[in-house]
Amino acid sequence: MSSLDTLQGPQDLQRLPAAMLPALADDIRAFLISKVCAAGGHLGPNLGAVELTLALHRVFTSPRDPLLFDTGHQAYVHKILTGRAPGFDRLRQTGGLSGYPSRAESVHDWCENSHASTSVSYADGLSKAFALSGHTERTVIALIGDGAMTGGMAFEALNNIGGSTRPVVVVLNDNARSYALTTGALAAHLRTLTHPDMPDRAGPPGSAGSPQTTPPNVFTHLGFTYLGPVDGHDLDALQTVLEQARALRRPVLVHAVTVKGKGFAPAESDEADCLHAVGTVDAVTGYPAPTPAPSPPSWTSLFGQTLLELADEREDVVAITASMLRPTGLHPMALKYPERVFDVGIAEQHAVTSAAGLALGGYHPVVALYSTFLTRAADQVLMDVALHRLPVTFVLDRAGITGPDGPSHHGMWDASLLTLIPGMRLALPRDSVQLKALLREAVAWNDGPSALRFPKGVVGPETKAVRRTGSVDILFESGIKDVLLLSYGPLAPLCLEAAAQLVSQGIGATVADPRWATPVPAELRELVAAHRLVVTVEDNSRTGGIGSHLVQTLRDHTITTPAHNLGLPRDFLPHGPRAQLLCDAGLTATQVLTTVLRARAGTPP
């Protein structure tokens, strides 16, 4: 990859003769395929943005002109062009290159953006800052996909920028997809601008429209000069239109049409998600390496299977997601009951309040989101669902430590949020049996909202209870009621290991799985009161988490059993293997044992 070795920064790219750029684009694609297939990461989005990123760095001067990547998973080419190609050998590994923009990595990364529909708002604020400080020669560029443009926040920002005269260039990377095909009226409108049979199209891909020749569209109505559509893989056309946008010194939207997964046949032919995000896969076929034995089901697939069974049984069960039909496990239900599954685009706030409307209309919506994305709709969960005590079930995938996607994707805060909400019932299944049972219990509840959270990855073996009291499962009891370990979710094996170590040291131990974290049942309060010490263990932030909620409940009922809460630190945790990050956070059997021994000795854990 000698052509890449010469690129230490964007200035090297700007000095290259234009005739060398197509070969460079080919080298970048080959590099991405080789490195991402080996390490895992976002392949399809970056293959589709090669020429677009080259043109942006040729026309604009980073970091003087901030280049802001919406969602951030299509910034790999940007990282290569800003001197970080050697880091791809440790992409998304502990201490290695992040899979998203990272301010700690480079001055060329202005924001650590991996949540969608935000780049245009960043651009609005940065352009205001430049205007206030007199840096009117600088241009702010926001690169946003058509999928991310479906989020309401993007249009809030367009509304503000379009009413100004500030030099902001919004580059719309239109590949007609997020994970899958983009849905809704905006997608249809963009097709009218790019499809050759539509009467109001602005021009063929490869040509750049102008204010005089472009028919009115949603962006011109919002105050932008619309340029495009332009072929997002034609370097000459891209550079021409971006230079025109830079020269206008006002709000401009450049509409670039690209192909997700461009240059890698398995991605281009994959109708599901164009190899959007991959684990370790074959760099020729795009398929994962064969496993010697069938792997256990994932939490996601098990949820999808169980939800389909519930949909078969109940016609009032409907499902909602935000552009993540397959990643959240809703695809099986969508195939069988397409009229009962709603993909609302990357619009979590709208998803939640739309679910509230469905509940008002007599249906039971199941809202399937990643944990990290639920926090974007906190107000809607609180005021639009819980205030009305509506029967909506939230299913939160990727809860807790997620691993290589890093701080923006760890689902560390959902439980802290949900335990604050009056009437919210929060369940944490420990295994496949409990996931099926708790989802059924949640959907059967009609007096308010419920939520289930589970981690990324495969489901572990079943952890059977020795008995049940109320809704609480007792997983182990030695007979002597010294220490009660409360295991929330799939950390049960950890607590059982710690209990065995306690018993080996002559300390009586009980391990209980509350199953429902909220509301705290009377049986759990009685169980705590019968022990000398309680330790809670959760894959969520300790701050305001499930353990904190339990302690407050115990105080409200004048239960004085000392309690210690173990969980994730109040910090943004780096990317790395889930097991390692849990260990670093002290969520190990050894740390549980240490906490108990220190508490019994009267020293701080």
Image: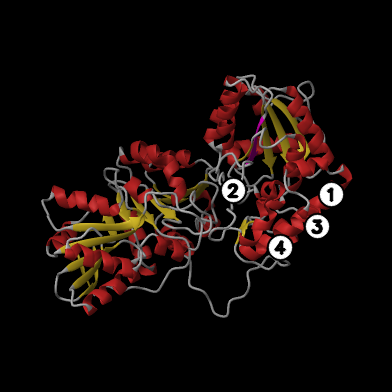
In this picture, residue 243 sits left or right of residue 300 = right
Q: Residue 19 appears at what percent x and percent y?
A: 89, 45
The amino acid beneath tag 1 is Pro
Q: Which mark is residue 2?
A: 3
- Sequence order check: which comes first, mark 1 or mark 2? 1
- 142 drawn magenta: yes
Q: CA distance from mark 1 to mark 2?
A: 28 Å
Q: CA distance from mark 3 to mark 2?
A: 23 Å
Q: CA distance from mark 1 to mark 3?
A: 15 Å
Secondary structure state at the residue bearing disc 3: helix
The amino acid beneath tag 4 is Ser
Secondary structure state at the residue bearing disc 1: helix
- Sequence order check: which comes first, mark 4 or mark 3? 3
Q: Main secondary structure of the magenta part?
A: strand
**Local crowd at mark 1 within 10 Å, few (<14), some, or many (≥20)?**
some
Q: Residue 234 appears at what percent x and percent y?
A: 82, 43
Of residues 264 and 143, the one nearer the viewer is 143
- Sequence order check: which comes first, mark 4 or mark 2? 4
Q: CA distance from mark 1 to mark 4?
A: 19 Å
Task: Judge whether residue 331 can be spotted in this image.
Answer: yes
Span shown in magenta: 140-146
- 277 drawn magenta: no
Secondary structure state at the residue bearing disc 2: loop
The residue mark sitting in front, 1 or 2, is 2
In this picture, residue 158 sits left or right of residue 423 = right
Question: Vertical placement of 388 versus 512: above or below?
Answer: above
| Residue position for label 1 | 22
- Sequence order check: which comes first, mark 1 or mark 3? 3
Of residues 589 and 600, the one nearer the viewer is 600
Question: Are the residues flagged by discs 1 and 3 in contact, CB closer than 8 Å?
Answer: no
Question: Residue at horizontal 73%, vertical 40%?
Answer: 57
- Check the picture and name the quadrant holding the N terminus: bottom right
